[in-house]
């Protein structure tokens, strides 16, 4: 299949691109390089032996999409492109609604006009808000607590409305838990610009000497050691989840929602210790007050994805730390410009 990957040079998109190539599919990447570098394409080629087709462009640019869709016989789209920083979305809501909501609307319209009826959307566990019971199943109530989360919910709802109006659409909503790690070769990984918002890249940058110490946001949560608990999932498992979802869902009409997580939670201190063991480096830390908007615990019930897609996360927290460290050590300042 020819698969359009919007945001395909980004963190999750690039590793999914590798997974798709290894599965014999033909990815076509559209990315505006707003949060990624062209060097990613060479790295994908180094890992797979195939340089994916690439169009530099914006998902909100209808003419660009129409041209891409006319040139490549696209069978399905995976829509990764978007902005993803919760804190930034509170300060700058309009670019988030523009990129994430308007972007998805333009993409769906262009796919529609080109006769493409299969879309897989990168959603997030953030749509569950402060869930009352763990693990979180897909039936749990949704409730966004910040503009980023609201954009994810709005796109989910827009695609549901589309599938309700036009029953030949196949819409798959993938709710990611906490993707971490990189390719074991150290060639592909997460390359945050500026100060990392997320735990794993922050720890990795402390371990490699780019930052002095980790700040742990709160040790007074109702969790076993008082620090926040999350469902960290290896990005290669996530990539496999996309391949499984695409294969299962292509041509199957309607909307289906899947959690992509491991079903296991790890605390901040557990991740820190696992990273120290994987890297052989000490990671100094201080404890600070809770970060606004954080929940105590969040982990997935991944049973539906296993039952319906035959997919299940395989990789341990040790491997997530090992592969993050290989990437960080080989690329201390990220991808070359
Ligand atoms: P990323 O920033 O590494 O990748 C996103 C890519 O999209 C970047 O390469 C960026 O240049 C591109 N992009 C952004 N806006 C664009 C636009 N308007 N047109 C074309 N390209 C554009 O982020 P990621 O971590 O790979 O996340 C991918 C998707 O998964 C996002 O939609 C994100 O919200 C979602 N998600 C990520 C996480 C996570 O923790 N990383 C968790 C849940 C959901
Ligand atoms: N966290 C932390 N210090 C950091 C970044 C994150 O203590 O510098 C904690 C955060 O409070 C949460 C966990 O690590 O309990 C995961 O945070 P992340 O931002 O990676 O993911 P999310 O909050 O989106 O689940």
Image (cartoon, rainbow, N blue to C red):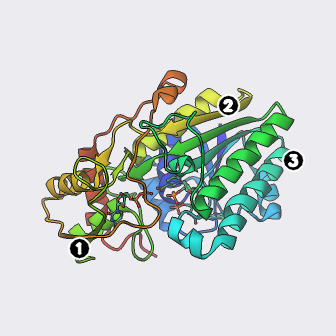
Nearer the camera: disc 3 or disc 1: 1
Provide residue 124's location: percent of width, then percent of height: 54, 49
Nearest the viewer among 144 and 320 is 144
Mark 3 — residue?
Answer: 113
- Say what secondary structure mark 2 lies in: loop
The picture quadrant where one finds residue 187 is: bottom left
> Could you tell me which quadrant the N terminus lies in?
top right
Is disc 1 in contact with disc 2, using a CB cutoff of under 8 Å? Answer: no
The answer to whether 337 appears left or right of 90 in the picture is left
Q: Residue at x 23, y 73 (%)?
A: 213
Label 1: few (<14), some or many (≥20) within 10 Å? some
Q: Are marks 2 and 3 in contact (CB under 8 Å)?
A: no
Q: Which residue is mark 1?
A: 213
| Image location of residue 219, percent across then percent down | 26, 60
Question: Crowding at label 3, few (<14), some or many (≥20) Cα neighbours within 10 Å?
Answer: few
Determine which of the numbered discs, if any, sits on residue 44 in the image.
none
Q: CA distance from mark 1 to mark 2?
A: 46 Å
Question: Nearest the camera: 249 or 105?
Answer: 105
Looking at the image, is 137 positioned above or below residue 58? above
Between disc 1 and disc 2, whose residue precedes?
1
> Label 2 neighbourhood size at 10 Å, few (<14), some (14-19), many (20+)?
some
Residue 250: mark in rendering: 2
**Please, what secondary structure does the residue beneath circle 1 have?**
loop
For ligand 2, give the image quadrant. Answer: bottom left
Residue, x 81% and y 31% (percent of image)?
168
Q: Quadrant of residue 214?
A: bottom left
């Amino acid at each position: 299949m020819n698969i359009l990957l919007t945001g395909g040079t980004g963190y999750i998109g690039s590793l999914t691109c590798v997974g798709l190539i290894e599965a014999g599919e033909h990815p076509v990447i559209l990315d505006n390089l707003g949060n990624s570098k062209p060097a990613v394409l060479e790295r994908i080629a180094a890992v797979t032996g195939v340089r994916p087709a690439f169009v530099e462009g914006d998902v909100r640019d209808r003419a660009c999409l129409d041209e891409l869709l006319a040139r490549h016989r696209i069978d399905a789209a995976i829509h990764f492109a978007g902005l993803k920083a919760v804190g930034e979305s509170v300060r700058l809501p309009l670019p988030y609604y523009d990129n994430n909501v308007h972007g998805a609307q333009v993409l769906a319209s262009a796919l529609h006009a080109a006769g493409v009826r299969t879309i897989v959307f990168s959603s997030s566990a953030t749509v569950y808000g402060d869930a009352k019971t763990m693990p979180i199943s897909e039936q749990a109530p949704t409730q966004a607590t910040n503009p980023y989360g609201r954009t994810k919910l709005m796109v989910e709802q827009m695609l549901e409305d589309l599938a309700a109006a036009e029953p030949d659409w196949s819409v798959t909503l993938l709710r990611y838990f906490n993707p971490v790690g990189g390719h074991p070769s150290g060639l592909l990984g997460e390359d945050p610009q500026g100060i990392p918002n997320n735990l794993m890249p922050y720890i990795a940058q402390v371990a490699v000497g780019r930052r002095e110490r980790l700040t742990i946001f709160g040790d007074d949560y109702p969790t076993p050691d008082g620090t926040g608990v999350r469902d960290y999932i290896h990005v290669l498992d996530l990539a496999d989840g996309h391949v499984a979802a695409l294969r299962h869902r292509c041509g199957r009409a309607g909307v289906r929602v899947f959690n992509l997580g491991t079903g296991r939670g790890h605390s901040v201190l557990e991740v820190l210790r696992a990273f120290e063991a994987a890297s052989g480096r000490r990671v100094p830390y201080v404890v600070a007050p809770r970060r606004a908007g954080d929940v105590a615990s969040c982990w997935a019930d991944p049973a539906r994805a296993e039952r319906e897609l035959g997919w299940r996360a395989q990789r341990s927290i040790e491997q997530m730390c090992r592969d993050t460290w290989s990437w960080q050590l080989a690329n201390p300042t990220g991808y070359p410009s």
